[in-house]
Image (cartoon, rainbow, N blue to C red):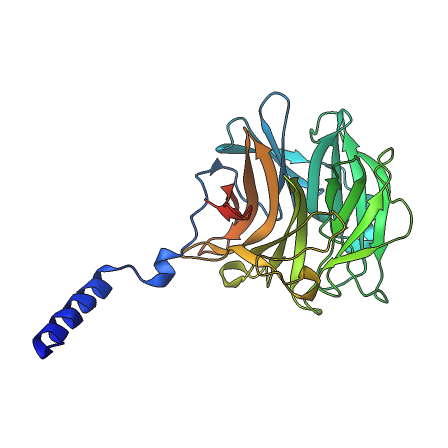
Amino acid sequence: MSAARSRFIAVVLFATALLAPPAAAAAAYPNPARVTGDVGVHDPSAVKRADGSYLVAHTGDGIALKTSTDRVAFRNAGSAFPNGAPWTTAYTGGSRALWAPDISYHNGQYYLYYAASTFGSNHSAIFLATSPSGASGSWTNRGLVVESRSSDNFNAIDPNLVVDEVGRWWLDFGSFWSGIKLIQLNPATGLRQGSAMAAIAGRGGGAIEAPYIVKRGQYYYQYVSFDLCCRGAASTYRVMVGRSTSVTGPYTDRNGVLMTSGGGTEILAGHGSIHGPGHEAVLADNGSDLLIYHYYADNGASLLGINRLTYDSAGWPQVV
C-alpha cells in the first residue's frame, strides 16, 4: 500500500471516529417516561384496577398510596394505615415509616406485603394486609408473615408475592446479609406455609435487595437491585435480572452465572440526571410489561420512574 493511500485511510478513519457517538452514549439507557403531579416515591409497586386506573404503594408513614387514571398524572391517595400500625413498632423503633410494599390483586381483594425495620438492621419483619378497595384506611392487618433477628443470616424486608403457573403462592424477599430468599405461602391465608426457606440470589454478603419475580413464557424472571440506594444523587442502585424455568431456581444471568453466585444481567443503571434507579416492580399493562421503580434527581429527590420492557430474540428483557 502506498504512503499516500495509507494517509488517506487514516484521515477517513479519524473523521469517522469524530462523527461517531462515544460508546457510552450509544449504550445509554432511556430516561423514564413522563409523569406529573405527586410523583415523589420510594420503593414503589403498582396494580391496575378493574376500572383502568392505577394504584401505587410505596415506602412512607403507614404505607403511602398514589393513584392515576392515565399512568401520567398521579395524586396523593393517603396511606394504607392512616391511624398507624402499632403491631409493627417492635421492629421500627417507634417510627411510623413502613417499607417496600408489594401490592397485587387476588381472590377479589388487594394484598399488601410490607416490611417493618430500621436502617442497617436485620431485626425486621414482613406483614400482610388486605383490602376490598385498596383505599386509604380500608386495609386489615392479617398478621406476621416472616421475621428475622440479629442472630439470623438474612433480612426480612423487600417482599414480593409470586403466584406460580400451578397456583402455588411464594414470597421472595431479602436485603444484603446472605441475599434473597424464597418461602412458600398458604393461598387461603396469604401467610407462611411450612418452615422451608430457599436461597435464590446473593453476592456473598454484598449489596443486593428488592427482588421481584414474574413469569413470562417459559421463564421466571428474577429482578433485583444491586449496590446502594438511599444516598440521594450519590445512589448507585442498578437493576439486574436472571431467569429460571422453575420459580425456585436456579436463576442464571445471560452469561449463565448463577444469581446465588453474584450473577445478574444489568438492564438499567444511572445515566445523566437519573441517579440510582432501582427497587423495581413489573406491571402487566395493555399487553406489555412496565418497569416501575424509583430514581434520584440531581437535587436528591426520589421520584417515580416508569419504562416499558421489551424482550429480545433470546427472551431477555430490555428497558425502552
Which quarter of the rendering shows the N terminus? Answer: bottom left
Horizontal and vertical percent position of residue 37 = 49, 36
Q: Nearer the viewer, residue 232 or 203?
A: 203
Residue 238 seen in the current view: no
Relative placement, left or right, of 96 versus 196 is left
Specify the farthest residue to the front: 1
Relative placement, left or right, of 250 versus 19 is right
Report the residue at 21% width, 63% height from top: 16
Q: Nearer the viewer, residue 253 or 212?
A: 253
Report the residue at 62% width, 60% height from top: 256
Specify the farthest residue to the left: 4
Q: Nearer the viewer, residue 287 or 239?
A: 287
Which quarter of the rendering shows the C terminus? Answer: top left
Horizontal and vertical percent position of residue 267 = 52, 53
User: Could you say which quadrant of the image residue 127 lies in?
Assistant: top right
Horizontal and vertical percent position of residue 13 = 20, 67
User: Could you say which quadrant of the image residue 180 lies in?
Assistant: bottom right
Report the residue at 56% width, 37% height from top: 289
Horizontal and vertical percent position of residue 263 = 63, 62
